[in-house]
């Protein structure tokens, strides 16, 4: 099976490529390597996959690592000339679209980037899938689509018509667009609603690295909503396991319903933000200075995934925060030494 993974230099995309390669899949990675955060981390991830920076920096150049067969191309999803060429040349069976402009807070400051990548770029992926007989499209949605949903745990059947950030709105639009293409063109699609992913090689704009870096350097950490927050913290290995289970089980068309599915991928057990901070403190052997602040715009006090649907096809979250944070801090100390 030949799989295209977009966002291959990103946190989840890197781990997915690594896992799929070890399982013997033919994997092509795509990323535009934008500078939303330090590109050195993105190039370091690609180096782990066997792609040198000198090759990865060149747009539209398909580079191959001979030892594991991994191929990589630097490309913008918005490129309506080069993206169809890639699909036509490579003959993918499955597409896992993890490329997106990420970040709830940044979407308030720079909305155009989210429309360009998450809507225009996503449409181009859909069109390429339509024109190239793709057997299954998996794509990154987000738990942020649940907005201020007060019903817990969050279920895929819940109303998600009230996003509270543009980022969430673009992810909701992705789900709607996928439904339309599944209905019109019979493309099996699976939307992946990720819940607070953390682990080695994580994004530096996310809380785990921000906390670990500040605590390690004796700076105060910012604790929003005065610490009255909980998240369904999900270790990266559980996320990858969930994606691979769904990848192997595409949805099927049933009577008048298209082959369309939305899935929560989370731990299924929300944890207090303060407990997560404590786990980081324990792993570092240091105590945090805490600056308590009010809730930020676009943020929510709680997330909690109902993973019943995914458990029915074999998923089980295995890593609790103490174990997961231990693995994360071990990597953090090594990478940022």
Image (spheres, rainbow, N blue to C red):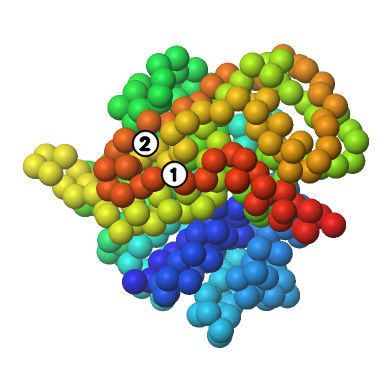
* Rendered location of residue 34, percent (x, y): 68, 54
> Total of numbered circles in the picture?
2
| Label 1: which secondary element | loop
Disc 2 residue crowd, few under 14, some 14–19, many 20+, Cα 10 Å: many
Q: As displayed, is residue 153 above or below residue 136?
A: above
Taking the image as shown, residue 191 lies to the left or right of residue 309, namely right
Q: Nearer the viewer, residue 207 or 251?
A: 207
Marks 2 and 1, how far apart at CA? 9 Å
Residue named by callout 1:
317
Q: Going 34% across and 31% down the picture, which residue do you hit? A: 156
Find residue 158 and report its horizontal and vertical position in percent.
34, 23
Which residue is outermost to the right?
218
Residue 177 x, y percent position in the rendering: 35, 40
Left or right of residue 323, residue 227 in this image: right
The answer to whether one can see residue 15 in this image is yes
Dot 2: element? loop
Which residue reaches farthest bottom?
66
Q: Is residue 43 above or below residue 315?
A: below
Look at 54% across and 49% down and name the residue there.
236
Residue marked by disc 2: 307
- Quarter of the image with the N terminus is bottom left
74 w.r.t. 223: above or below: below
Residue 84 image position (x, y, % from top left):
43, 65
Crowding at label 1, few (<14), some or many (≥20) Cα neighbours within 10 Å? some
- The answer to whether residue 304 is above or below residue 317 is above
**Disc 2 and disc 1 in contact, CB within 8 angstroms:** yes
**Relative to 154, is 79 on the left or the right?**
right
């Amino acid at each position: 099976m030949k799989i295209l993974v977009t966002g291959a230099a990103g946190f989840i995309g890197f781990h997915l490529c690594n896992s799929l390669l070890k399982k013997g899949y033919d994997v092509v990675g795509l990323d535009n390597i934008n500078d939303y955060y330090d590109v050195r981390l993105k190039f370091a991830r690609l180096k782990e996959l066997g792609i040198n920076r000198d090759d990865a920096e060149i747009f539209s150049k398909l580079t191959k690592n001979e030892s594991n067969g991994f191929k990589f191309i630097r490309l913008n999803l918005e490129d309506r000339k080069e993206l169809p060429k890639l699909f036509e040349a490579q003959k993918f069976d499955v597409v896992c679209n993890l490329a997106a402009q990420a970040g709830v807070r940044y979407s308030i400051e720079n909305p155009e980037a989210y429309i360009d990548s998450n809507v225009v770029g996503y449409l181009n992926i859909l069109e390429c899938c339509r024109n190239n007989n793709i057997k299954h499209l998996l794509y990154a949605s987000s738990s942020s689509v649940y907005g201020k949903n007060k019903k817990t745990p969050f279920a895929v059947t819940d109303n998600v018509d009230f996003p509270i950030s543009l980022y969430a709105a673009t992810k909701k639009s992705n789900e709607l667009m996928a439904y339309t293409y599944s209905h019109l063109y019979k493309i099996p699609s699976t939307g992946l609603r990720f819940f607070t992913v953390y682990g080695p090689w994580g994004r530096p704009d996310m809380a785990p690295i921000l906390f670990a870096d500040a605590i390690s350097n004796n700076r105060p950490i910012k604790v929003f909503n005065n610490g009255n927050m909980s998240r369904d913290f999900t270790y990266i290995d559980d996320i990858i396991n969930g994606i691979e289970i769904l990848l192997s089980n595409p949805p099927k068309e049933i009577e008048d319903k298209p082959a369309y599915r939305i899935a929560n991928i989370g731990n299924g057990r929300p944890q207090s933000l303060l407990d997560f901070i404590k786990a980081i403190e324990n792993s570092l052997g240091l105590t945090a200075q805490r600056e308590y602040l009010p809730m930020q715009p676009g943020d929510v006090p709680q997330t909690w995934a109902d993973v019943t649907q995914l458990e029915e096809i074999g998923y089980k979250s295995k890593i609790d925060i103490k174990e997961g944070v231990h693995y994360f801090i071990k990597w953090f100390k090594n990478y940022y030494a």
